[in-house]
Amino acid sequence: MSETIGIIGGMGNEAMADLAANVAALPDADDYSYVCYGNSRQAFTPDEADGEWEDGDPPIRRKRHTGEFTAALLQNFGAGRVGLACNGGHPLYRDIYGGFASTFVDMIAETAAVPDADDGVLVLGTKRTLEERLYDDELEAAGVDTYQPTPDDRQRLMDVIYDPDFGIKTGEVTDEAESMLCDVVAAACDRHPEIDSVVLGCTELPLALNDESVPRLKASGALPDHLSVIDPTQVLAEALLPPTGSVETPDQVALSAYRGAFLDYDPPLTVAVDSLEQMIEFQTLLVEWTMDYFADRDAHVGGSYMHVPTLFLVDYSRPIPVDTDALDLTVHRYETVPSEPDAAVEAALDRNFEAVSHLC
């Protein structure tokens, strides 16, 4: 029986698949099983995304209770090590995992150890990530000088990520988003020649700046040629597999203890597949199918909250260790990924649209 690695996603449309792709590329990836919970109900709704919220406000309490339930569910599936495919959720999950037996692998702390002490690092991310200095404080504690975009460019970054017409959260990296992102980076480097590296502190940004696009953008002059691009998702993937080669399976917990009053639980489309590659293909197609589903109804997907919650069991050749009936879960097993929505996917798309269409 292989040990299980957990991946929490859902707060970036393709972030979970991107993290899984980085893990799948590692030489020992096939030694483990994976539980990947793309719980989109942890995300802010479109109306909440740009708000200023305090700890006691309903959106924050909803994220807390939903995050606790997510962590408990992953532990009960046997996940001994867990990575979070979301930058802004790290402070919450650091706190949540203080009460769980599973090991939380901290993407921000791991990333802060990458630059040399004499590097100047430009930090990109959402307004919330930049205002809370999630990367800046960790990097500066390691002796690294950090820089941020101007307030105007922070808003442009939010547009790159969230704009309903061209933002990356629409499910596509558009030319407009790519160009605007490069302009923000180039402007910061012009203001601060000390910048050597850029940290992509939002899981949407590595979808635009990656091993394929960065050489092209440097060759065109859109990005400074000397700039190193640090992808925290890649850093997390490399840290997520255990250095000793083994993962201790944690004891199960009572899920009833994590059904808080603000829990936002929508039973995920639950899929068992044989490989991370199948999971990545399925999740990527599901993003496309969701976009098409909304478009066919003259509606827009405004942020991650409106995507279908998913739960992938990868190479899970063992009895399901949780009560799927109590969770209203039906495990759909696939030997190959469907090329178009089948009955299970169509039902999930219908249920999701019914749940979130009032936000369009």
Image: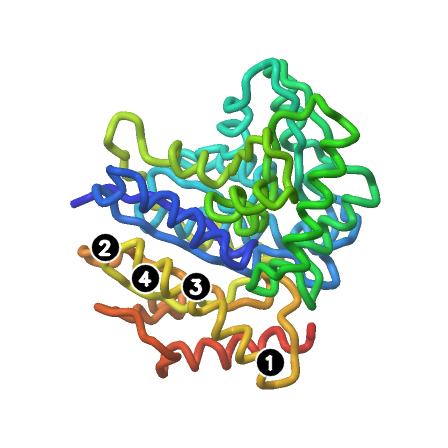
Location of the N terminus by quadrant is top left
Provide the residue designation for mark 4. 323
Where is residue 19 drawn, in percent x and y? 43, 47
Earlier sequence position, callout 2 versus callout 3: 3
Which of the 4 image quadrants contains residue 141?
top right
Tag 4 and tag 3, C-beta contact below 8 Å: no
Q: Give the camera-side residue of 74 and 163.
A: 163
Amino acid at pointer 4 = Asp
Provide the residue designation for mark 2. 315
Dot 3 falls on a residue whose secondary structure is helix
Marks 2, 3: nearer the viewer: 3
Q: CA distance from mark 4 to mark 3?
A: 28 Å
Please report the residue visible at 40 percent of the width from the left and 38 percent of the height from the top. Answer: 237
Provide the residue designation for mark 3. 284
Do we see residue 89 in this rendering? no
In this rendering, would 63 be left or right of 50? Answer: left
Tell which residue pokes out farthest to the right in this image: 152
Where is residue 8 drawn, in percent x and y? 46, 49
Dot 1 falls on a residue whose secondary structure is helix
Tag 1 and tag 4, C-beta contact below 8 Å: no
Q: CA distance from mark 1 to mark 3?
A: 17 Å
Q: In the image, which disc is placed on residue 295?
A: 1
Please report the residue visible at 54 percent of the width from the left and 40 percent of the height from the top. Answer: 93
